[in-house]
């Protein structure tokens, strides 16, 4: 790595396991890069596995939420938290999955500026409220999601995705995690 990807100076774990090497190769194949978030966790393969297992389950696993909707949650939460890394990386994912660069930009700056279907707006309103004022979530908030067409399982997935990105945003901020430069040009 020529550029520092975090403000921390954590020595690498040493030789990466074959499973991690294969995972990084899969990232290069599918994305054209290994996301810096993964490289920043590579100092401890146990932490890297915990992160990737959770991420892959939430973002790629079975859910009533589409991949785009999960990425939209990531961006809305990261926008509230001003997470440079996640806004850059997941903003690119929204652009790519939606095929709409303007939607990606609106999501990064203010999802309320986007002309979203009421169901997606309700989902993002919930994720943002959970981010800004979690103690104020009440049954009326869950009822609004049900009214918009989400199942209780979907509500779990919305909450889990929002919570994961709140955690990730805070780690990224604490260590000044830098996004891969390639994300800036993706899907434009």
Image (spheres, rainbow, N blue to C red):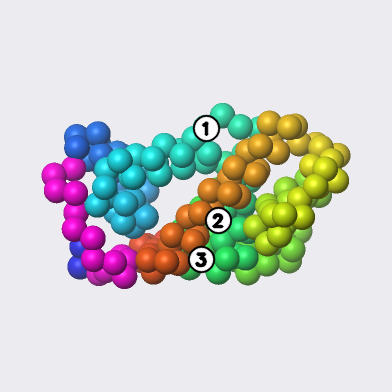
Indicate the quadrant where residue 180 lies: bottom left
Query: Which mark sits nearer the N-terminus, 2 or 1?
Result: 1
Badge number at residue 61: 1
**Whole-Å distance between the Cαs marked 2 and 1?**
19 Å
Nearest to the eye among marks 2 and 1: give it: 2
The residue to which callout 3 is attached is 83
Callout 1 secondary element: loop
Closest to the observer: 134 or 75?
134
Please state the total of marks drawn on the protein image. 3
Q: Is 45 placed above or below 75 here?
A: above
Instruction: From the viewer's perspective, tell me whether residue 85 is left or right of residue 132.
Output: left
Point 76% across, 50% down: residue: 137
State the SS at label 3: loop
Tell me the CA gap for discs 3 and 2. Answer: 9 Å
Which of the 4 image quarters holds residue 104? bottom right
Q: Residue 165 at x, y = what percent?
A: 53, 53
Q: Looking at the image, is mark 1 or mark 3 nearer the viewer?
A: 3
The mark that comes first in sequence, 3 or 2, is: 3
Toward the viewer: 31 or 188?
Answer: 31
Q: Circle 2: is it few (<14), some (14-19), or many (20+) Cα within 10 Å?
A: many
State the extent of the magenta-drawn residues as a range. Answer: 3-16
Q: What is the number of the mark on residue 166?
A: 2
In the depicted structure, whether residue 144 falls above or below residue 5: above
């Amino acid at each position: 790595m020529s550029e520092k990807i975090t403000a921390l100076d954590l020595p690498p774990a040493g030789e990466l396991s074959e499973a991690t090497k294969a995972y990084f190769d899969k990232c290069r194949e599918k994305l054209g890069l290994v996301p810096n978030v993964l490289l920043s966790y590579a100092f401890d393969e146990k932490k890297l596995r915990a992160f990737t297992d959770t991420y892959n389950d939430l973002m790629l696993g079975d859910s009533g939420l589409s991949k785009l909707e999960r990425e939209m949650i990531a961006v809305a939460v990261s926008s509230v938290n001003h997470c440079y890394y996640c806004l850059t990386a997941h903003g690119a994912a929204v652009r790519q999955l939606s095929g709409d660069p303007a939607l990606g930009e609106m999501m990064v700056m203010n999802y309320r500026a986007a002309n979203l279907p009421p169901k997606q707006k309700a989902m993002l309103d919930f994720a943002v409220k959970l981010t800004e004022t979690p103690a104020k979530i009440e049954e009326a908030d869950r009822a609004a999601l049900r009214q918009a067409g989400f199942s209780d399982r979907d509500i779990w997935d919305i909450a889990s995705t929002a919570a994961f990105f709140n955690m990730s945003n805070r780690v990224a901020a604490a260590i000044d995690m830098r996004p891969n430069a390639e994300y800036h040009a993706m899907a434009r």
